Amino acid sequence: MKYINNKLSIEKINFQKIANKFETPFYSYSYSKLKENINNFKNSFKSFSPLICFAVKSNTNLNIIKEIKKLGLGADVVSQGELMMALKAGINPNKIVFSGVGKTSNEISFAIEKKILLINAESLSEVKEINRIAKFKNRKVNIGVRLNPDTDAKTLIQISTGKKENKFGVNKSILYEIINYCNNSNNINLKCLSVHIGSQILDYKPYEKMLKTVSQILSKTDHSFEYIDLGGGMGITYSNKNKKLNYKKYNTAILRFLKIHKVKIIFEPGRSIIGNTGTLVTKIIYIKESGKKDFIILDAAMNDLMRPALYGAFHKTLPVIKSYKISKKIYEFVGPICESTDKFITLKRFQKLKEKDLIAICDVGAYGMSLSSNYNLRPKLLELLIKGSKIIVIRKRQNYKELI
Ligand code: LLP
């Protein structure tokens, strides 16, 4: 995204032009950025050609998943809904892994029927349930087991998953118990060891540490795993203060690991694939003065983009038309929802704004639309895919008939 003649532009079109055609608020995604992200990801790890399974939870739009499929990725899903969406997008079941701590019997049964690559189990009880269903269906099912490596991902506490106090995965001793259980089962083929230590990780060292732990665990068992699923979690640059994840160092650590363990690697990236492709375009409804501060009341709200309210997340916020007059006021960008946490950001020294101006909230491609809700009975937003100068509607705005 860049300003061309003071107009914020995406690919070959500017947001003002898009907003002339479509009512705000809406999400828009850049196709070329998506392609670039996928190519960069593939290139970073090309020496061992991993299976890259897009974490569907980060963006559940059918058309986005279709594009991702065309660019060669598989899917990581965490519910029957996501699995059905991935299949509908045409992803080969052989490239789908199913994660999650609480898969129901129906979900397990559905996944077995669809013959997906792996069901990544997260407890002994789940493994037993998979075994029971597989036996009933007279099938042999490929599974993985998720290890909790007790590694600090050094990210936000709300999105850390690899510490022993987190609900995810199993500890070493349960892992060995599960290996034993699977070796005595005719209906389960334990093929994969999986880990996912957290999200928005910008430091490669937790990954390095996690690989060491996995390596130690593997050397203490005779069981041979075909796959190691390293999860996702690669962070992106939301703010200039964020450092960049060093993919080279992560790749080197994996290559070191692969010298000892002859396995295939799976990744489950979400944010690093789709995060920086998305923009939420919103219009100022009213400006309300309040002493030194002005409330910039937008037509988008926390139900459309939860991350700031939920995690205190920072999203770069830009004017769609740039001017050079700076306001002396502090601007607090808020939505119309009846909650004080319905606030996106507070900024000083922003350009002078007026009612009806357009604002772009950046880097919302991951966990933006997918985390949105109908709170306050607000319809789900329109989603657009931008390819060059083409605007493609990839999800219509929900209408009130559907809602009521
Ligand atoms: N694999 C598993 C098992 C996961 O739980 C997750 C994310 C991923 C892969 C993808 O992680 P990514 O590459 O996107 O970091 N709503 C939060 C993020 C929650 C992430 C949950 N799990 C946010 O908006 O920051």
Image (cartoon, rainbow, N blue to C red):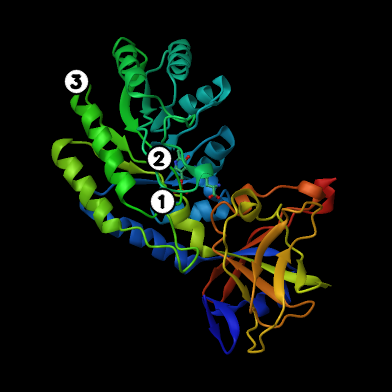
Q: Few, some or many C-alpha atoms within 10 Å of disc 2 (few <14, some 14-19, many ≥20)? A: many
Q: CA distance from mark 2 to mark 3?
A: 25 Å
Which residue is denoted by mark 1 in the rendering?
Answer: 201
Taking the spot 80% from the left edge, 77% from the top edge, the residue there is 355
* In this view, 95 is above or below 360: above
**Residue 367 pos. (x, y %):** 57, 51
- Sequence order check, earlier mark of 3 and 1: 1
Label 2 residue near ligand 1, CB within 8 Å: no
> Horizontal placement of 260 versus 232: left or right?
left
Mark 2 vs 1: CB contact within 8 A: yes
Q: Quadrant of the C terminus?
A: top right
Q: CA distance from mark 2 to mark 1?
A: 9 Å
In this view, the residue in front, 219 or 94, is 219
Label 1 residue near ligand 1, CB within 8 Å: yes
Which residue is denoted by mark 3 in the rendering?
Answer: 222
Q: Amino acid at mark 2?
A: Ile
Taking the spot 56% from the left edge, 33% from the top edge, the residue there is 80
**Residue 52 pos. (x, y %):** 36, 47
Which residue is denoted by mark 2 in the rendering?
Answer: 197
